[in-house]
Amino acid sequence: MATLPDGFEAVALTPDRLPDVVELDMWAFPTSDSLESLVELPNPLSWDRARGIERADRPGELVAMHASYPFGNTPVPGGRMKVAGLTWVGVHPQWRRRGLLRSMMETHFQDCLDRGEPVSLLFAAEPAIYGRFGYGMCARQLNLTLGRRAELRPVPGTDGLTVRIETRSADRHADLLLGLHGAVTRPGWVGRETPELVATLFNDSPLFREGREIARIVVVERDGEPVGYALFRRRGKWGPAGPEGSVHVAEVVAPDAAVAHVLWTTLLDLDLTIEITSGALAVDDPLLSLLVDARAARGTWQDNTWLRIIDLPAALAGRQYQAPLDVVLEVTDALLPANAGRWRLVAPAFGPASVERTDADAELALDVRELGAAFLGGTSLTELAAAGLVTERTPGSLPRATAAFGWPQAPAASWIF
C-alpha cells in the first residue's frame, strides 16, 4: 500500500474536479493558454483511473495527481496485452521533493496489479525521472525533415490505389481511422480505446494548431476500401522568392509498401510548400528505404515510450520470442519485490512461453528497468550488456537471449499520451 508523507491525503478525482485538474496541470507544465480555454476542451481522462493528492489541512487544494489510460489491446511481440498508459503525472512546484511522486508511482503499480495490467507504458516529459521507478526506454522514434518532391523508389501496386484529401472529422473518419490504426501489430502501438481519447483526437481547437491549418487527412483506397491514411496540417508562409510553406505529418498508417509510397508521394507534392516534417516514425519505417536519397532526410532520434514491468511472470509469458529460449534470469526490483529473484523463461520460436521461479543458477542478471527496455524487442540485451547493465554469468546465454527477445518489427507508439 502506498504511503503518503505527513500532512497529505489521497483523493479520488471526478469530472467536477476538472478545473482543479487543469490548473494543477498548468502548474506542472507551463502554458500561455488560459484556464478557461483549456477547461472547455474535451478532456481525455478516464476518471475512474485518476488519482489526486491534497493537503490534509486544506481539503480541495489539489497539489499532485496522476492518471492512466486503459490500453486493453496493445500489441506486444506475438500477441496483445492489457497495458496501463501512465499520464498526467504532476506535482505543484511548491510541494516537490516531499515524496509525493513516489507515493503516486506506488499507487499506480498497485492499481495495475489490481486491474490485471502486467505492463505500464509512458511518454517521459523528463527521462531522468522514470528510470528511478523501474521504467526502461523500450522504443525510439525518428523525426524527419524532407524537401518537397523528395524522390521515392518505385514499388509495384501503386497504380491500383486512389487518394482522397479531406478535412478530418469524427463523423466521416472515426471508424476508418480507428479501424486501420487498431489493425497495426507493431509492438507498443497503443490505440485510442476510450470515447474520451477519440473525442480528444478529433478536437481541432486552435490552441493546439501551433500556427498551422485545420486538421487534414489523406486516405488511400484500394478497390474503394480505405487501406491507409496520414494525418497532416500545413503552415502557410511566403518569402521573397515565393511560397515557403510546410507540411507537418502527425501520423501515418500504411500496411504495405504501395500504400506507404502513395501516401508519402501525396504529402511530398502539396502546393505552396517547400518542406515536410514528420515525428514519431518508428526507426524501421519504410520511408527510409523508399527514399532515393536518404541523406536528404534530415533526421533526429529521440525516446518514444518507456516501459515498466509490473507483473514479471505474466508479462514475460504474455509475449512471444523469435528464437527458442531456455534461460534463467536473476532480476532485481527495488519497488516491486514480487518481481525480484530468479526466473526460468522457456519458449519456442513464435510460440507460448512459460515463466517459473527457480533455484537454478542465474545465466543473466539485470534490473527490471533493463528487462522493461528489452521487453518489446526494440532494445538489445547485448547493447545493454555493453553498457554494463546486463551481466552474462553463463557464456553464450547473452547472444541466445538477445536473439530471442528481439522482434522483426521495431516498437513505437504513433501518438503522445
Image (cartoon, rainbow, N blue to C red):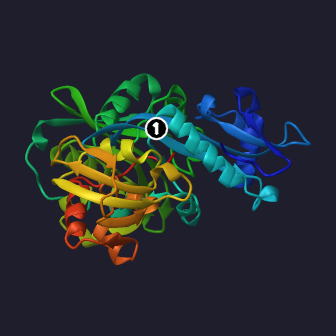
Point out residue 284 in the picture as x, y percentages from the top left corner: 26, 58
Relative to 416, is 186 on the left or the right?
left
Q: Which residue is outermost to the front?
A: 359
Considering depth in this image, is 245 or 9 the residue closer to the camera?
A: 9
Q: Which residue is outermost to the top?
A: 171
Q: How many residues crowd mark 1 within 10 Å: few (<14), some (14–19), many (20+)?
A: many
Quarter holding the N terminus is top right
Point out residue 153 in the picture as x, y percentages from the top left corner: 14, 59
| Residue carrying label 1 | 117
The image quadrant of residue 360 is: bottom left
- At a point 90% along the width and 41% down the height, the residue shown is 58
- At a point 57% along the width and 63% down the height, the residue shown is 132
The answer to whether residue 278 of the structure is visible from this angle is no
Q: Amino acid at mark 1?
A: Glu
Q: Secondary structure at mark 1?
A: loop
The image quadrant of residue 203 is: top right
